[in-house]
Image (cartoon, grey):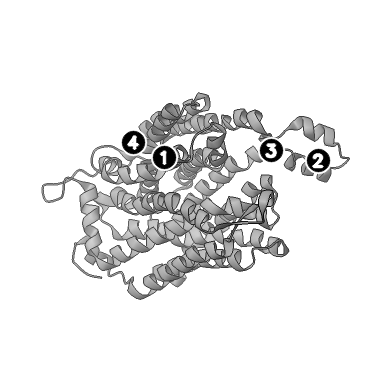
Amino acid sequence: MNGAIRLKLFLMMFLEFFIWGAWLPLIFGYLPSLGFTDGQQALILNAFPAAAILAMFFSNQFADRSMAAEKFLAISHLIGGVSIFALAWVSDFGTFFALMLIHCIVYVPTISITNSIAFASMKDAQEEFGIVRMGGTIGWIAAAWPPVFLLVNWAKVGDAGGAGIVDWLNAVLDSPLQGPAMQDATAWTFVVAGVASLILAAFSLTLPHTPPKPATEAEDSAAWLKAMKLLAHPFVLVLWVVTFIDSFVHNCYFNWTGRFLPTVGVPGNWVTPVMSIGQIAEIATMAVLGMFLKSLGWRTTMIIGILGHAARFGIFAFCGTPDYMWLIIFVNVLHGICYAFFFATVYIFVDEYFPKDVRSSAQGLFNLMILGLGGLVANFVCPALLTAFTKTIGAAEATEKVVDFKGLFLIPCAAAIVAAVVLGLFFHPPRKEEIVEGKPAG
């Protein structure tokens, strides 16, 4: 793969994940500010995992069989860009949910499609994919950090004074917007996401041509059905189930960490930067992923990624006090290992082991777990678990609700350990020729 194509694929990934990163981190606080109920918020947040499930049975099959991948990407981001852009001016639930659902339905499949475009242009996926996918990580960071400075009460910063850059920076980070001003400013994140989506729609037409693979008479007309049939191979089924568990654990982190960090002394407006340490670490991890895959192999690399979750939740559980705030902050670097060593490795593995004509749908098969069912289950289960581990202390008017985070975090910690053990014992991929030929090996 020459340098010009690699740069285009890098920019494609940058824009792809910039779009997502622009609106996701702040939507958890934005939806309550619009007056939406808990149920309405859950429906909006679950539009994304629901779209991942729908994509498995429609969009990825369509991309596999009927349309060049780069054209599908352009059309999807044109529709998705308009819908997410419009959310900046919507405050009623019905319209908001409809627009978010439209955006997610057309956006989620493009995650698989961008992978397919990248893999089709690579000669050595193990060596090259990590560098290209790093563009997505940088895109997420580029979208997530500016709001920390943009959503600032600059009048308060001016009043705080301060002679040096450190005093000024402390004043900026300690002066977030509040109330209606914060709501109005946060709405602009949808504008940013929409503009980025429209830019990617145009840029997609310059990407390497990736033609569809029409089904022959001997093949299933539904690419997703052929991908599902691959679950008959035990090693594929094991990886699919482990992917669900890992995705659930991964989403537990995003559901609970924002509530947890302030309890160990992290200021509220530092929560997003602390959590994004993981994405910064992911850059370095993705850069060396190819080297680790070649030296450790598929199974060991993925087990290390899963155990990264267990280590992070274990530290959260047993060191969750202000005395260990530095460790709680530092351990977020494990996100890079958790994502690259498992999720990115799964994508590379799928590309190498699945037949060419169903690769987009095969990627969608695992995105069904990574972006769909794992998140869907977590978004319903995590709030219930949080409530179950919350107790009221004190008496009369001096009561206070306290979350038993130690007990809470031990649940995903244990789940990650179980997933790693299952993968270690039962994941035994055969030679690639056997899975391509459809032989029931593994």
In space, the residues marked 4 and 2 are separated at their CA atoms by 47 Å
Residue 108: horizontal and vertical position, in percent? 39, 42
Indicate left or right for 143 with 127 as reference.
right
Indicate which label's residue lies in the foreground, 1 or 4: 1
| Residue at x-position 42% and y-position 32% | 97
The residue pinned by badge 1 equals: 43
Residue 180: horizontal and vertical position, in percent? 63, 28
In space, the residues marked 4 and 3 are separated at their CA atoms by 35 Å
In space, the residues marked 1 and 2 are separated at their CA atoms by 40 Å
In space, the residues marked 3 and 2 are separated at their CA atoms by 12 Å
Mark count? 4
Q: Which disc is residue 92 wearing?
A: none
Is label 4 in a helix, a strand or a loop?
A: helix
- Work out whether mark 1 precedes mark 3 in sequence or the reverse, and give the earlier one: 1
Indicate left or right for 159 with 187 as reference.
right
In space, the residues marked 1 and 3 are separated at their CA atoms by 30 Å
The residue pinned by badge 4 equals: 72
Amino acid, disc 4: Phe
Residue 138: horizontal and vertical position, in percent? 56, 47
Residue pushed farthest left?
A: 217
Q: Which disc is residue 149 wearing?
A: 3
- Work out whether mark 4 precedes mark 3 in sequence or the reverse, and give the earlier one: 4
- Work out whether mark 1 precedes mark 2 in sequence or the reverse, and give the earlier one: 1
| Quadrant of the frame with the C terminus | bottom left
Indicate which label's residue lies in the foreground, 1 or 3: 1
The residue pinned by badge 2 equals: 168
Q: Is residue 256 above or below residue 209?
A: below
| Residue at x-position 44% and y-position 61% | 342
Is label 2 in a helix, a strand or a loop?
A: helix
